[in-house]
Amino acid sequence: MTTDSASMNDTFIPPTDFVECLQELAAARPDDTALTVVAERNDHWIETVLTYRVFTQRVLALAATLQRLFTRDERVLILLDNDEHYAVSMFACFHAGVIAVPVFPPESARPQHMARLAGIAVDAQASGILTLSTLKDMVGTAASQLGVSTVIAVDDIDRTVADTWHPHRPAADDVAFLQYTSGSTSAPKGVMVTHANLMANERAIREGLSIGASDIFGVWSPLFHDMGLIGGLLQPFYSGIPCVLSSPRFFLERPVRWLQMIARHRVTISGGPDFAYRLCLDRINDAQIDDLDLSSWRIAYTGAEPVRHDTMDAFSQRFASAGFDAGAVYPCYGLAEATLFVTGGRRGNGMVVSRFDDSALGDRRVQPDLEGAALVGCGSVPHGHHVRIADPDTGRPAADGVIGEIWAAGASIASGYWNKPAETAAAFVERDGTRWLRTGDLGFLHDGHLFVAGRLKDMIIVRGHNLYPHDIERVVESQIEAVRKGRVAAFAVLIDGIEGIGVAAEVSRGLQKLVAPQILADAIGVAVSEQCGQAPATIVLLNPGAMPKTSSGKLQRSACRKGWEKRSLDAYAAFQNGQCVVGEGTAGASGTPHATAAADATASDDVTRDLADIWRDLLGHDPSFRYASDAHFLALGGNSLAAVQLAARISQHWCVPFTISHIFDHPRLAAQAAAIRAQKQSGAPVPADVIPVLSADRRAQPLPLSSAQQRQWFLWRMDPLSTAYHVLGALRLKGQIDIDALRHAVSVMAKRHESLRTTFIVESDGAISQVVHADRTIDVQLVDLRHVASAERDVRSTASLHALLGDPFDLIDGPVARVALVWLDEQVCILALAMHHIVSDGASMRILMSELGAMYSAGTAVDADTVLPAAPLQHGDYAVWEQAGGNDRDTAQQLTYWRETLAVEPGDAHPVLTLATDHPRTSTTQYVGGRCSLPLQEALLSRLRALAARHDATLPMLLLSAFQALLYRYTGQRDIRVGVPVANRTQPQLANVVGLFVNTLVVRQLFEGGEPLDQVLTNTRHAMIGAQRHPSLPLEALVEVLNPERSASHSPLFQVLFNYLQDDRNALEQWRHVEVERCELTPSDAQFDLALDVHERVQGAVTATFVYAANLFESATIDRMSRHFLRVLTAFADDPLGCVGDVNLLEPSEQQDLCVWSEDPTPYQEDEPVHRLIERQAGQHPDRIAVLFAGQSMTYAELNRRANRLAHYLMGLGAANDGLIGVCMERSPELVVAMLAVLKAGAAYVPLEPAYPAKRIADMLHESGVILSLTHTPTHATVARHDTLPFINVDALDLAGFSTANTGVEVHGENLAYVIYTSGSTGRPKGAANRHGALLNRLAWMQDAYALDPSDAVLQKTPFSFDVSVWEFFWPLMTGARLVLAEPGEHRDPERVRQLIRTHGITTLHFVPSMLAAFLSHDNAQACDKVKRIVCSGEALSAELQNDVFQKLPHVELVNLYGPTEAAIDVTHWTCHDDDAHLVPIGYPIGNVVVRVLDERLNQVPAGVAGELYLGGVALARGYAGRPGLSAERFVADVAAVGGARLYRTGDRVRWNAAGHLEYLGRLDHQVKIRGFRVELTEIEAQLLAQPEVRDAAVVVKETPGGQQLVAYLSARPGKIIDVFDMRDRLSRSLPDYMVPAALVVLTELPVSANGKLDRNALPAPVYISAHAYTAPQGRTEEIITDIWASALGLARVGAEDNFFELGGHSLLLVRVHAALEDALHPGLSVIDLFKYPTIRALARRIDHGHSDAEARRGMDHRSAPHAGRRAALLSRNRSHARSRS
């Protein structure tokens, strides 16, 4: 986000520099008061007044002295207090050309006081010091130690030497002074402020504060600080107004002096940091206020430290009685590196306070909340300056609503740091051609104000959470009355390598006596814990005045941290992890700490004692640590994770229900113990959840299915042949194999686990039951491959296993489990087990493999009961218990959790992951499975495990985070949901039961794009912990409750799966007599579109395997995805603070591919504008036919002569380069002449479609600024007249006297050629202004690609208001081919198009795909055998239509072009192939065009991933005519290019396919294509909302039997009625016919969701109504027409007087109607005739009676298709004109 300034009309003439400034003031106003210095001695005010004459004399005297002692640019320290000597010294340095270095006078010569001065002197390499005579001895001693040779006492300067000053004027880039920022004494940084910086900032301050001649400044801030020097002292001189100056000590000793100074001198502008106002509140009493008059105070600026609304509110209220106006409060923001002033409010407007959600601020998000944290707006940026809210990692503008780093730019930004190039390079950066200052402050823009949210470097990161010191300080101050306001600092501490929160607070000595340190520390700990979920690791209670501050009074958090580390803070008590380490209670000689001096609370109570033991264990306290009864779990270091563990431990220890809520409700020891006792006494023990074992009789009966089994049954019935839900396991056994022992072990498993002997039946009532068979066994199928050659053995074994185990299971007849043994040689075999998921899961497989190993190892003679534990419980017991409600205890609570966790806005659907596929999705989810495995390297795993540990997370959580991040980057969807299977064996009884218990949890991650990776991990961890606390609600139940949109093509709630599997060491160890290792067996089918299975081996090796639907994805796509996943993991490991949206997914080879695919730099031979190429054809082939129309022709010579005459005429009227001339004509030779003439005159033409409503034409004329418009006879009388704009009828012109020679006007590539208007999202059409260079490049490419020659004929039928017409007109003419013009309206009639093709031998023509489909449906389309090339563009070309072209016109070359009007017609091309592709690409970029597919953060996306298409290169339009704001929004800087290149944001969603071809996927906004016309829905809505009776309006696209239609939904204002027919008529006066909605639906109110958004799903289906009462058709003809219309329109009833277009009809639908009429009635009509007769009755009369046009027209409906009558006049005129020529 970037904000620029607005210009200010300011008649003040700014001085060039302060030398000029002072000299002019002294010359013009010598006796005016310049400076008044206020001091107090012995309770008496002393004032020193200096006029401009006196002040200037003293300045010149000192300047002359400096010139004598120092050379130019030497550094001189100014070591003075706030007085006239300081002011004189600064100006003297300016006049002498030396560099001033303002510094703070040391309090004494002691080392600690001299250290900062020494650091600055050394860094600046100072040559001299300016001070007072009283300080000269002390300063001189220090100077000799610092190597400073010259010390000058400025009060001893002889003023008579002023005449010896050598006039000096500084250059703009000369350094004026070094402003040293507050920092460590070892490394001070001097900001180099140049004279240009200084003057620019003074101008900004003057503008920002609206300073006038009547203002008076009052200053006490130290002049060695930027606020005092630049804003306080220098600004009054800059503006030529008085300055009243006092010292900081003058104010700090008695704050009332400041306000007295304001009152006494009628100061209008004064201010200081927050602490100054707070000091006034604390130390000025009511009696003193009564003596003040602050009514003159107009600006009370506050800045330099966080602006606190509570301080300024309290100040305004307290001093209101003294005349202080709250409107005077002026928050501002600035810093030394920006000279001073960056932003400020508006004078007199007071303080702007907004409230924001606390937790959102902590997540770097901006979420307004009326009950949230209050922040003060710091105003806006002044003229000539800019502020950007930037992503701290990338520097790109942050998204709206995201907190980022504040960057500033403009003339005020300093040159850098003195002699510190590295620090300069880090803070002052180049981006987008602009030099930016990285302020290090966090902030955001809201409602036109800059809000500062904290410091980037002060951020505290605890357990992955970003905590901001300001938030912590605000909470402590607001909740803890005992601490001093403005004297609380929060900072990061590192204890045992773990970052934690440190809090330091000053406490008055009076309160130190009243409040025990432990109590105060506990209170601070509680306040912080409740805010942050984490107690402070360190709390330091400071004595008054001990808080480290800068010289200007700002808190120094870093100094607090260092002071704590060195134990150098003046603290009376300090606590670490809850233990007192400084002050009372500190560990004594024994070293045994204790929490408080109170008696041990655990001495006599068993519950409290046991609870304390648990606390000690969880908090890591020593066993000797003792807790007071009011000890606070969170204050002692507990966090939310520890609270979860504590709740579990309590529940387990006392067998009572105890949740994390109990912990937060009762955090203190005694209260928590009491809550435990209350739970025990309430008789609410934790239910044992004992699942009863069924009796033998009940077990023998059919049993119900569990919820999970019911879903499996449903999936099996949908696809009984699928193997997607087979649970497979295999072991490779090496050693002497005992086949009998193995068979015995398998037999024992079958007897032991009833699930393996279960089948399923359908009851008579349709219910499904499971039946356990007592006598069923499992055979071990043997496959002996010992005789097979070793080279083939592995292949054969794999095939055998797949054949045996991949065979579908029959759940009705069984068996549901199979075992196979594949013998490879005498010592090696593979044991494989397959089960259907309905009776097993992953945990069951581990149980079986372990028990099989134990039984095999025991041998055949040993009874199973002696080897394996008893297994009384079976899955059937669980299913009966679950279905009887045994699992219902937590159902309500679990449902509540999942409803809230997965909630979407009312009216919004649950998201479906739009992962782009390589193949079209089918109507089912029956997928063949594919696999792609990715072993993770140990070095990477080590770093990932370390990162997870630092965030209290697990490796699976981290891998899931990376997977979700990858899915976000692949889809751009913010709501990413992944299914995660969990064992769901919460009852101990289920530990060894074989059956289906697994449940799939939905883990949701909401992405913004700017969050750091470690925050993604934290979010995933939080989501996983929450999900694991609520694991038992069956997914099926959740789906039923949430009721997401169902589809057979995808699973509900989530479409991808993440599964983390770990080898069971125990299972392998049970096989004691053979060597065992696990084998991979995979189902041949896939359950989901995509799943990520992560397998951790016993040894710790990890492999990530992508299991995918091979029906949807190519293997290369998933292989590429796996590599991108690895790059995401690497980013997590190496840069966890990097933004998820900026992880570079692309490998170098991919980047190279994208570079090659993205542009085609091709030099074309032609470099002259298009009209010159046409002139060349006229010169070389004058008699060749150029234009054919209505049976007549025009040669190239005649075309050129006519165009030249008109061009010379236009030039006489002022036509010139970049001038715009409107053209409003029907398609005709005159139109071609007019367009060519405009180009020859050097101007650009603006097509004005005659069919457009008059208002729309008027709007286009007004906005474009055309100088005149050309018409001809058929259109002249009907077009709108502009008040001042001439419309010239070219037919009425006598051009015989004008030259026929070429004009020779110089035209270069940047001049405009044409401006074409398209629908606009703002409610107004927008004109894309295209350049000659872009047009020439487009046509040169087309000729290079398709090579027209004189034998070719191109059909021009596209309305010239659409850019396709541009190449239709000019391409054939520049190449010597024939241009054939369709007559007006003929482009809508496929039969007429066919006739033109046949008559004129058309070789090349264009169709929008919808019209091409209509053309191909015509019976005679195949007869067009002369056509060589069909060009498609304007809307997506479907594969079906492509195949239809090749079937009916196999000889034709079909070309698919793509391009927006904003980029010279077309920018990509694709030659179609007769193949079975499901998607027709839009291809490659044309020559010299750049195409980029970028995500929302402007990163290039990989192949296969959807993004927005951006266009660059020579094709781009200049912008939108008359719309600079819109141009800037859509034509953006190309950050990847140099030299100021631009990109156009198309709003189109595309992707690269693997071959490097672009594929079009749809729109990203509300723009749609209706029958090839580009339509912005918001433009139609704007027109509707402009109608006085309309309250709300929404326009949508609806699919109807007649294709896509626009439908408008309206609601009326109170007391108003909407007439839809009148409304349609009004719309037709301002919108083209294709933008007038086919139906207008009036509702009482538009449906909205709870958040106020339009609920589009609730909009009813449109009803098309007629303006006439129903009239039944009469006669056979009317009845046939009625049936045809009703079928085409999808209506049940159509009246004889109904208008086809009012019922939702359109031109393409009329083509279908025409074909049906021809088949049924053979009337011999054209499509144009149907436009003329839009009602059934009029059309039937025409068919039945064969009336002439004139006779039939008497019966025509007055609402016929627009402008139908003009075409006859045009044809008649052109034929007459042709006859007159002949």
Image: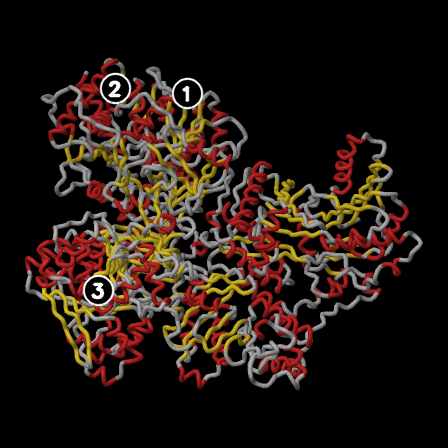
Q: Which residue is mark 3?
A: 232
Residue 1048 in the image: state x and y as whole percent. Answer: 59, 47
Q: Residue 62: horizontal and vertical position, in percent?
A: 15, 59
Checking the image for residue 1683, the label placed there is none
What mark, if any, has residue 1428 been given in the picture? 1
Front position in the image: 179 or 1202: 179
Kind of residue at disc 3: Gly
Mark 1–mark 2 Cα distance, whole angstroms, equals 24 Å
- The furthest residue to the right: 861
Point out the tag, 2 or 3, that comes first from the N-terminus: 3
Question: Upstream in the sequence, badge 1 or badge 3?
Answer: 3
Q: CA distance from mark 2 to mark 3?
A: 83 Å
Of tags 1 and 2, the one toward the viewer is 1
Few, some or many residues within 10 Å of mark 2 (<14, 14–19, 20+):
some
Going by the numbered disc 1, the residue's amino acid type is Lys
The location of residue 1417, given as percent across then percent down, is 45, 30
Residue 1192: assigned label = 2
Separation of residues labelled 1 and 3 (CA atoms): 79 Å
Given residues 1132 and 1601, the one toward you in this image is 1132
Reading the chain from its start, which is encountered first: label 1 or label 2? 2
| Above-or-below relation of 954 to 628 | above
Where does the C terminus fall, quadrant-wise?
top left
- Say which element carries label 3: helix
Specify the amino acid type for callout 2: Gln
